[in-house]
Amino acid sequence: MEEKNNIFAAADSGEYLAKALNGKFYSILRVDPQKNRVLVLHSRDYPQAVNTEMDWNAYMSRYGAILTAEGQERLRKRLSSEALLSEAKNGEVNFYIDISYLKENQTNWLTVSVLLEKNTDGAWFANMFIWKSNSEHLMRSIIDMYVYETCDYFIYLDVRNNSFVMFNGNPLETSRIAEVSDDYEKAAAEYAENFVVEEDKEMVVRKMSLKYIIKQLENNKVYSFTTGVIDPVRGYTRKQLTYRYYDRQAGKVLLCRNDVTEIYLEERARQRELEAARLKADTDPLTGLFNYGGMSRRVDDLLLKKEKLSAMLVLDLDNFKQVNDSLGHQEGDHLLWKVAQALQLQNHGTYLCGRVGGDEFVVFLYGIDDKKQAEETAYHICETVKSLTLPENLSGLVSCSIGGAFAPEEGTDYRELFKSADRRTYQAKRLGKNRFLMEDMDE
């Protein structure tokens, strides 16, 4: 052991350190941004300046001739004294930038790693480590290109410590969560409050909670959801947040946010087109009411719940054939349209109505309080149709007969209810028309 100590004691530790620094770094600098001065601690290309202090602007301008225009702009924007003090004020005390320079007409890259620290007097200093980084820059460029083209940002989430850091993000995105935080739950709540649309806020806070995330990842390799986000620049956007384990045992999770606005809007437009097509297929072109198919599908959907008392009213116009024969089909169609308008005007969102045959209409009341409510509706419809304004020679001729049936006691689908209600409609006609029946009459 003593012999080894002698070997190490004989070596010039300063020489070894110099070789190590020379092999790794081009330069090591300590900058005083308040005084705009730099102390050169190590420099491979400017050895005569080592251990000397000089003006920081003068030091930077020395390299202006070899830097690309982009490199000069980055140097000025990120490493000037004003920029360094601004970074310190904003809490960015550890960061790196890449600077491009020309050598033999080829673009090369230097990486500058910056560590800002405050001394006992409260003054800020910037420690800079500069090294050649062509291969590292290529790798970062590939990663950045992938991130910027496919993701808003990546976040490294430490579930056990409720903390995270954003290790890559698209700077163009303005609706962002904080870049670093030791309280992920709080940051997630602030993100929801500041950017998420009102109707999604509660959902996002719940789905971004650590407890919920872990529960989902325990059952699935990947967990994701989408939400509406108000971007300060773009307005409404749609974002997809995707969580996956980076290290399950250590509780490390990767969070990636993607912009899916274009896909979302395309899907919404497609859904609207499909809905419009379905509505057109389900609508009677003459009256604008549902047709047979539209009415039957909607009634069956409601009846599947099997929870509430409901009623179906089948309405048939009295003496409609005489209208067609005396005034023609055009006036007959106009009468059907007027009946439809009357049904819609009387309907205050309490029932569905449709024209399911020539002069046959269906009114469906879902979730009524009692059978009396259906009877009152049938009565008002009879009075309304009887009061329609018609040509003098038809005055008092047009009325309607209505038959009713109740769910679930008389049927649990459209076909069953219609069969019972339609039978009572024709019973009402035989009893003298202009009336309604809600149960079978002895004949």
Image: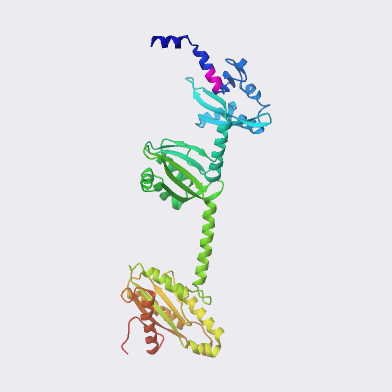
Is residue 235 among the parts visible in the rendering? yes
On whether residue 399 falls in the magenta region, the answer is: no
- Position of the N terminus by quadrant: top left
- Total of numbered circles in the picture? 0
Which residue is located at x 41 percent, y 50 percent?
Answer: 203
In the image, farthest residue toward the front:
3
Judge whether 32 appears above or below 173 on screen: above
Find residue 390 and report its horizontal and vertical position in percent: 52, 84
Please give the range of residues in magenta.
19-23
Find residue 7 and report its horizontal and vertical position in percent: 45, 10
Based on the displayed image, in which of its 4 quarters is residue 146 positioned? top right
Which residue is located at x 50 percent, y 29 percent?
Answer: 94
- Position of the C terminus by quadrant: bottom left
Is residue 171 among the parts visible in the rendering? no
Q: Report the side of 148 relative to 378 (left or right).
A: right
- Asked whether 136 or 319 is in front, the reply is 136
Q: Report the side of 54 relative to 239 (left or right).
A: right
Find residue 72 and report its horizontal and vertical position in percent: 64, 30
- Judged by its main secondary structure, the magenta piece is helix
Based on the displayed image, in which of its 4 quarters is residue 111 positioned? top right
- Asked whether 246 or 5 is in front, the reply is 5
Judge whether 213 appears above or below 352 on screen: above
| Colouring | rainbow
Judge whether 247 appears above or below 327 on screen: above
Find residue 201 and report its horizontal and vertical position in percent: 43, 49
